[in-house]
Image (spheres, grey):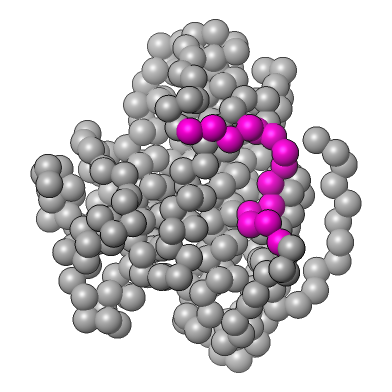
């Protein structure tokens, strides 16, 4: 990847989030996500709930990307292919482990984009909404960097393997409906990681190499943080449903059908899902076939 020049931050935090989303170099985007979170941390603590935070975010301003903008900004590689075309490789080989790490790194790169998109796209939400998603962007940037560093230790870089675009495709489907976005991105697609991560870690334990153990350790960090990210999705989905007088569980099924969300299938990581704010009733309903 090329060196990444830094440009001075300008505009509200939401304007800067849009500018960060347009960046094509993943490492530069990760740096921008960290810088946004740091700016937020530098606001006077006593002003957080009031006008200083609201002004810094530019909450009420509707934003429009430049006419020539390509959302999201991304590098020329990896080549994007249909999900079924992404080859499954054994993590018992160095190449296979690298491919697995690359697949997870691609998810984390897209997760940075998803968080930044939520910040710039949806005006008029409470300040805490933007604080939550700027924190998510910061943490996803850390996840990507950890994975990419480990991937490089195996002789590969982000972009070396094909990937699919399922996460961003759902982002596009829900771009005009914030309730659908909260329902179907963090608490559906990202929540699948809560279920999948322990299974991946169990497989990596069988590999038993130092490289596999490092991957397990990184996944521990990701799983811990992703519980919080899914909880944020649950929080705002519930808030939006409450504002609209909707039952969250039944409306979720409507949204999932409308936007053709992937069917969630057990086994579920019930402890992680409960910690992330799913109710026992919803987990039971997800376990039932339509």
Residue found at x 60% / y 71%: 120
Vertical position of residue 132 compared to residue 113: above or below? below
Q: Residue 111, image x and y in percent? A: 54, 49
- In the image, is residue 92 above or below residue 121? above
The quarter of the rendered structure image containing the N terminus is top right
Q: Is residue 131 left or right of residue 29?
A: left
Residue 46 picture location, percent across and down: 60, 85
Q: What residue is at 51 percent from the left and 50 percent from the top?
A: 168
Q: Is residue 71 magenta?
A: yes
Which residue appears at 55% of the width and 71% of the height?
A: 121
Splitting the image into 4 quarters, where does residue 41 fall?
A: bottom right
* Residue 47 placement (x, y as % from top left): 61, 86
Q: Residue 236's image quarter?
A: bottom left
Q: Residue furthest front?
A: 67
Q: Main secondary structure of the magenta part?
A: loop
Left or right: residue 286 compared with residue 225: left
Q: Camera-side residue: 45 or 149?
A: 149
Any part of residue 138 in sight: no
User: Over which residues does the magenta segment extend?
Assistant: 69-82
Give the residue at x 86% y 56%: 6
Q: Which of the 4 quarters of the picture holds residue 160?
A: top right
| x then y, percent, for residue 177 | 41, 70
């Amino acid at each position: 990847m090329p060196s990444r020049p830094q440009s001075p931050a300008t505009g509200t935090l939401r304007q800067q989030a849009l500018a960060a989303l347009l960046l094509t170099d993943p490492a530069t985007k990760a740096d921008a996500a960290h810088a946004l979170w740091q700016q937020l941390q530098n606001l006077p603590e006593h002003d957080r709930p009031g006008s200083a935070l609201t002004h810094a975010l530019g909450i009420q301003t509707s934003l429009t990307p430049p006419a020539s903008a390509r959302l999201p900004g991304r590098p020329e590689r990896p080549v994007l292919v249909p999900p079924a075309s992404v080859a499954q490789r054994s993590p018992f080989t160095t190449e296979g482990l690298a491919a697995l790490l690359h697949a997870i790194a691609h998810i984390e790169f897209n997760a940075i984009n998803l968080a930044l998109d939520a910040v710039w796209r949806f005006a008029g939400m409470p300040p805490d909404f933007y604080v939550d998603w700027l924190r998510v962007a910061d943490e996803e940037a850390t996840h990507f960097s950890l994975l990419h560093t480990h991937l490089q230790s195996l002789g590969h870089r982000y972009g070396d393997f094909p990937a699919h675009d399922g996460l961003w495709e759902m982002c596009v489907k829900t771009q005009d409906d914030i309730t659908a976005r909260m329902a179907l991105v963090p608490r559906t697609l990202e929540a699948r990681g809560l279920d999948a991560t322990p299974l991946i870690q169990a497989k990596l334990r069988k590999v038993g190499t130092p490289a596999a153990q490092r991957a397990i350790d990184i996944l521990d960090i990701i799983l811990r943080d992703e519980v919080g990210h899914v909880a944020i999705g649950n929080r705002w989905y519930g808030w939006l449903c409450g504002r609209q007088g909707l039952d969250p569980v039944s409306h979720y099924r409507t949204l999932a059908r409308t936007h053709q969300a992937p069917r969630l299938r057990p086994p579920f990581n019930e402890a992680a899902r409960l910690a992330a704010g799913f109710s026992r009733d919803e987990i039971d309903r997800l376990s039932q076939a339509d």
